[in-house]
Image: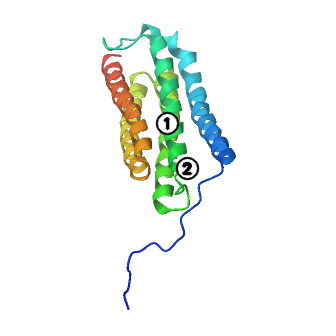
Amino acid sequence: MKIEQGVNRRPPVAPPSPGRQSAALLCFLAVSHGVSFVASLAIIGNADGWYAAAEKAPWTPPGWAFGAVWTVLYTTMAVAAWLVWRRGTGLRSGRGRGAMTVYVILLLVNLAWAPLFFGMYPMAGGAALWLALLLIAVHAVAAAVTVVRFGLISRAAGLLMLPYVSWIVFSLSLNAYAAASN
């Protein structure tokens, strides 16, 4: 008698129906762009105020570029999360739960950065920029972990998150310059 160890005896999970997949994608997009909207409130309220007069890094892109890039990034993040969910592991497996937990942490850290950087500066001055720098460093780590966790479940999902990591590291450089110069 042959003993099979480590073999997963669970039947394969059937993929969700097309209607459920569409609904889930719309939900992921709504959550992602909802985070974007809430975070943008702090930016819009201060972009023409203290930030307009602040010392910025010479490599800072024009203001319109931020909105365009973030729109693409929030969309690709949502699609990546949807791909992980769709893969069938979703929240049913430890790997899927772990990936989605890191993704939720990523969204929360993302949501917290703009109010700290833009909104707290008028009250806390340079200290807010340094705290935002610490938070964006955590953000970069969370984004990198998300790439790895997503990539283990869906290679496409991991790859879709790479531009996000790149933009966060770029944004970290802008935050560091602002903290050191203002």
User: Which one is in front, 147 or 50?
Assistant: 147
What residue is drawn where x is 39% and y is 47%? 151
As drawn, 52 above or below 28 = above
Q: Which residue lies furthest to the bottom in this view?
A: 1
Q: What element carries label 2?
A: helix
**Visible residue check, residue 120:** no
* Badge 1: residue crowd in 10 Å (few <14, some 14–19, many ≥20): many
How far across and how far down the image is residue 87, in percent? 52, 52
**Which of the numbered marks, if any, corresponds to residue 60?**
none
What residue is drawn where x is 65% and y is 46%? 18
* Badge 2: residue crowd in 10 Å (few <14, some 14–19, many ≥20): some
As drawn, 25 above or below 125 = below
What residue is drawn where x is 35% and y is 21%? 174
**Which of the numbered marks, if any, corresponds to residue 77?**
1
Give the amino acid type for the residue marked by disc 2 in the picture.
Arg
Mark 1 and mark 2 lie on one chain; the one further toward the N terminus is 1
What residue is drawn where x is 37% and y is 47%? 148
Residue holding disc 2: 86
Q: Is mark 1 on a helix, strand or loop?
A: helix
Give the amino acid type for the residue marked by disc 1 in the picture.
Met
| Quadrant in which residue 163 is drawn | top left
Q: Residue furthest front?
A: 1
